[in-house]
């Protein structure tokens, strides 16, 4: 297989690179490594002054940016990220400031991006796959408790009405409360009530001014309505005591959490019904009937997501269907595009064919057309109700090109054939033209028919050079998100599940819909688990197929 | 397959093809003979061309017909007026002009950086010998089997973490998106370039070294100049790939003003495919013109890159 072929030293270069030098030029002896790292025996010339200045300036800019990033990390107290980033910055400086280690200087930038956005994210996916990360489970337990206490608020029955005025100081709003007994207290968002001595009162006994603060007039209150509505003043330092809020800027009521939290037993109790919600060990509070509070937190769930994928009745059947279709789709796509591409390549492999160039340009147009648009355009043509195919070509037929499960699959394959055949046509043309013609002539001399020449000579030779490409084409189609998502959106949906999974969904569109789909809650944990399944499948297949192609190459 | 063969491949126009003597056609041949020899090839050509070109004509016709709905677009080229194009640029909630510029910016910056990072790596792999070189090349080969979009969930969460520290690099930022794309800068590109770099004779480097050239001078002054075709190919393929990228862009760019064409145009038809059809078609025509023009203009280079890819990896 050509790919591995490249990894063997080309003979001419192997001669230049002295073999003992290859093994130990890792830069252990800094001073010499620059020279020895070179392929030849000679050292590179010294850096020019201009080069040194440019290098210092660039490194300076990178470091300035790094210092900013590190500072922000420090301020946000992300200690782990800070430690890792500091190490990376140190490594970058070490790579570029030391003598020698030349390869690292050329590889570092690309490798850095590669490590963060291609390798790290894969491990991160692996981690997420073992958590219940998703809507309602996206933070820590403490955050969840605080959020539940804040959101589950009810007006305390029979609680007194407070009179309230809105004050402002330094661009923040304060509420001045007068309770029924005439006691005046000041509070603001998140700041508990405090006595407000020296408040001025109007004729009804409502406190309306305080030295150092400005009182808002009615129009101003209306103008800042949204912010004022959000002001939640805790009655005391204990969140269980409840809060004061105003709905109109002139009166306020006391609200209490509908659920009270008991830190000692780690439970929420519904203040009305007395139902007790306990930590159910699955990242949420649940009562005895299994009813959970909507806000939960992120926990590690072990293999739960994987187990769910293959046992949950609403997921297992559809998922199996999706996996089978993913394989069918990618194998069929490669086969169809290759057969058509090869057929066209042989058909037009004639120097004396008039109009050959025109055909060629027109035929590769689909390949030049942006892929995401192709799916959308075809979805218009194939639309069962309004599309051109049904309305114009078939004279008003009502064939569900995109809504019938079987036809939708055929449609997807045809559209993908449209997208993919020009590529195979180009590649096969190139490969055909590079075949030695002597073999061909010799075979014809021996009386072989054209088909025989093609079948026994050209095709085997062609496959050797094209096989790696067919494998990468398979890997590409395995994750060919655009054509599926733009054409059918994965639909038509399976009838036996309430999830958004359909007959033409492949694994990657399923991952996307589970993680970011509209309507259904986002479930990052499950989506990552599915992505990890794709990883494993692709890795296995490429390992096997690369071995196969190597065998193919060895045979020839 | 030897190096020489590989790189004469794309330009080998003179290669004799399809075997068999191609006799000079006599002036008049019976139709049957002509058809058996060449006619059927034209028939295949015409059928395939119709299959290939029809959807493009269809979208062009829909773009020029301002009645705007999917049903209305069925009569091909029955009405021609620029109404859809005008509507396209006058919808503040769907700033098509911005999308276009965004796509250009993200595409150009990413592909330029991709070419540069890839070329640096290819230079190191091609011209230097170091510990881990073989492993490095193999890992690049392996990593390319796993496209970034598989890790889209992790990318989203990583960026949302970053936006809490540095909003300018996190969710919603094009800079963040470009950084994510650069994660895929090595990989297949490096491989393609590595193969090409190897064809530049080593003796040129040696000569320059004797003259006292530094590695930077050799890289910029000699190598990069001699491999321009492959740089163009890689840059173009990167640009085309990125301008079509939907998954990651749709997750990262949430604000309509910062979106790219792929995300924006999808939103046109995602909800009501039928009503916005004409305007969408107009957008599709404008969006595809630069890419298609580039592709056809540089077709020869791209094809050589593809075939090199097919034989090289």
Image (cartoon, rainbow, N blue to C red):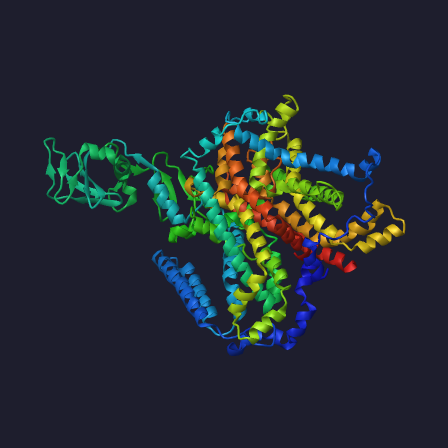
Residue drawn at (81%, 46%), measured in percent from left and top?
B22
Q: Position of residue A384 (x, y in %)?
A: 60, 26
As drawn, is B251 to the left or to the right of A407? left
Residue drawn at (14%, 36%), measured in percent from left and top?
A208
The foreground one among A226 and B266 is B266
Q: Position of residue B275 (x, y in %)?
A: 50, 27
The foreground one among A501 and B15 is B15
- The residue sitting at the top extreme is A396
The foreground one among B84 and A94 is B84
Q: Quadrant of residue B37?
A: top right
The foreground one among B59 and A3 is B59
Total labels: the figure holds 0
Considering only vertical position in the picture, is B72 above or below B282?
above
- The residue sitting at the front extreme is B27
Q: Quadrant of residue A388?
A: top right
Residue drawn at (53%, 33%), measured in percent from left and top?
B281
Residue A109 shows up from this direction:
yes
Residue A286 shows up from this direction:
no
Quadrant in which the N terminus of chain B is drawn = bottom right
Q: Quadrant of residue A314?
A: top right
Q: Position of residue A167 (x, y in %)?
A: 18, 40
Q: Position of residue A6 (x, y in %)?
A: 67, 62
- The residue sitting at the right extreme is A446
Quadrant in which the C terminus of chain B is drawn = bottom right
């Amino acid at each position: 297989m050509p790919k591995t072929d490249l990894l063997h030293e080309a003979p001419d270069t192997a001669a230049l690179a002295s073999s003992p030098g290859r093994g130990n030029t890792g830069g252990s002896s800094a001073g010499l490594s620059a020279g020895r790292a070179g392929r030849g025996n000679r050292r590179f010339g010294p850096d020019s002054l201009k080069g040194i200045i440019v290098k210092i300036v660039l490194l300076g800019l990178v470091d300035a940016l790094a210092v900013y990033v590190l500072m922000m990390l420090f301020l946000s107290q992300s200690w782990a990220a800070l430690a890792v980033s500091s190490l990376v910055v140190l490594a970058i400086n070490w790579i570029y400031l030391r003598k020698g280690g030349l390869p690292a200087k050329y590889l570092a930038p690309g490798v850095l991006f590669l490590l963060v956005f291609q390798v790290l994210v894969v491990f991160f996916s692996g981690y997420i796959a073992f958590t219940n990360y998703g809507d309602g489970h996206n933070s820590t337990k403490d955050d969840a408790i605080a959020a539940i206490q804040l959101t589950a608020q009810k007006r305390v029955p029979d609680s007194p009405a407070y009179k309230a005025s809105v004050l402002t100081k330094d661009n923040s709003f304060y509420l001045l409360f007068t309770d029924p007994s005439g006691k005046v207290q000041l509070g603001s968002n998140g700041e508990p009530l405090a006595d407000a001595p020296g408040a001025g009162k109007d004729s009804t006994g409502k406190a309306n001014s305080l030295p150092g603060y400005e009182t808002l007039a009615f129009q101003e209150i209306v103008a800042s309505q949204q912010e004022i509505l959000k002001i939640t003043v805790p009655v005391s330092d204990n969140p269980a005591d409840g809060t004061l809020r105003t709905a109109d800027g002139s009166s306020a009521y006391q609200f209490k959490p509908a659920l009270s939290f008991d830190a000692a037993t780690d439970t929420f109790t519904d203040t009305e019904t007395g139902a007790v919600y306990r930590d159910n060990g699955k990242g949420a509070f649940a009562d005895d009937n299994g009813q959970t509070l909507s806000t939960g937190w992120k926990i590690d769930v072990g293999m739960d997501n994987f187990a769910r994928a293959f046992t949950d009745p609403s997921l297992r059947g559809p998922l199996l269907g999706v996996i089978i279709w993913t394989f069918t789709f990618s194998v069929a796509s490669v086969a169809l595009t290759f057969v058509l591409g090869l057929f066209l390549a042989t058909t037009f492999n004639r120097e004396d064919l008039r109009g050959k160039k025109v055909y060629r340009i027109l035929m590769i147009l689909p390949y030049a057309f942006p892929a995401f648009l192709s799916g959308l355009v075809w979805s218009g043509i194939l639309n069962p109700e309004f599309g051109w195919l049904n309305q114009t070509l078939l004279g008003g037929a009502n064939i569900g090109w995109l809504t019938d499960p079987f036809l939708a699959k055929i449609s997807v394959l045809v559209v993908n054939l449209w997208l993919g055949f020009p590529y195979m046509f180009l590649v096969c043309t190139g490969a055909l033209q590079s075949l030695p013609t002597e073999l061909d002539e010799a075979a014809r001399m021996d009386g072989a028919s054209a088909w025989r020449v093609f079948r026994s000579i050209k095709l085997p030779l062609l496959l050797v050079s094209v096989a790696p490409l067919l494998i990468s084409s398979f890997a590409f189609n395995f994750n060919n998100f655009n054509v599926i998502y733009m054409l059918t959106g994965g639909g038509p949906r399976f009838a036996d599940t309430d999830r958004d999974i359909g007959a033409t969904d492949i694994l990657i569109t399923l991952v996307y819909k589970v993680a970011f789909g509209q309507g259904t809650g986002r479930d990052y944990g499950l989506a990552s688990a599915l992505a990890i399944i794709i990883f494993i499948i692709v890795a296995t297949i490429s390992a096997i197929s690369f071995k196969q192609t190597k065998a193919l190459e060895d045979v020839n | 397959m030897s190096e020489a063969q590989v790189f004469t491949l794309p330009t080998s126009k003179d290669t004799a093809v399809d075997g068999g003597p191609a006799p000079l056609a006599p002036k008049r041949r019976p139709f049957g003979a002509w058809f058996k020899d060449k006619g059927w090839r034209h028939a295949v050509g015409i059928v395939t061309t119709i299959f290939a070109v029809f959807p493009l004509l269809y979208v062009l016709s829909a773009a020029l017909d301002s009645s705007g709905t999917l049903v209305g677009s069925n009569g091909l080229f029955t009405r021609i007026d620029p109404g859809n194009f005008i509507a396209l640029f006058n919808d503040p909630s769907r700033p098509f002009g911005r999308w276009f510029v965004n796509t250009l910016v993200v595409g150009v910056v990413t592909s330029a950086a991709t070419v540069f990072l890839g070329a640096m790596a290819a230079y190191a792999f091609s011209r230097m010998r170091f510990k881990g070189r073989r492993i490095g090349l193999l890992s690049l080969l392996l990593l390319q089997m796993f496209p970034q979009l598989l890790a889209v969930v992790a990318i989203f969460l990583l960026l949302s973490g970053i936006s809490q520290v540095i909003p300018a690099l996190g969710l919603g930022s094009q800079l963040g998106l470009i950084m994510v794309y650069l994660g895929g800068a090595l990989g297949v590109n490096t491989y393609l370039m590595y193969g090409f770099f190897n064809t530049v004779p080593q003796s040129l480097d040696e000569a320059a070294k004797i003259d006292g050239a530094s590695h930077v001078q050799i890289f910029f002054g000699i190598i990069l100049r001699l491999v321009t075709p492959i740089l163009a190919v890689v840059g173009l393929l990167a640009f085309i790939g990125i301008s079509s990228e939907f998954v990651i862009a749709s997750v990262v760019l949430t604000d309509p003003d910062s979106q790219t064409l792929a995300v924006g145009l999808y939103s046109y038809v995602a909800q009501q495919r039928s009503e916005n059809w004409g305007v969408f078609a107009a957008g599709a025509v404008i969006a595809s013109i630069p890419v298609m023009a580039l592709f056809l203009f540089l077709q020869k280079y791209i094809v050589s890159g593809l075939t090199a890819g097919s034989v090289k990896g």
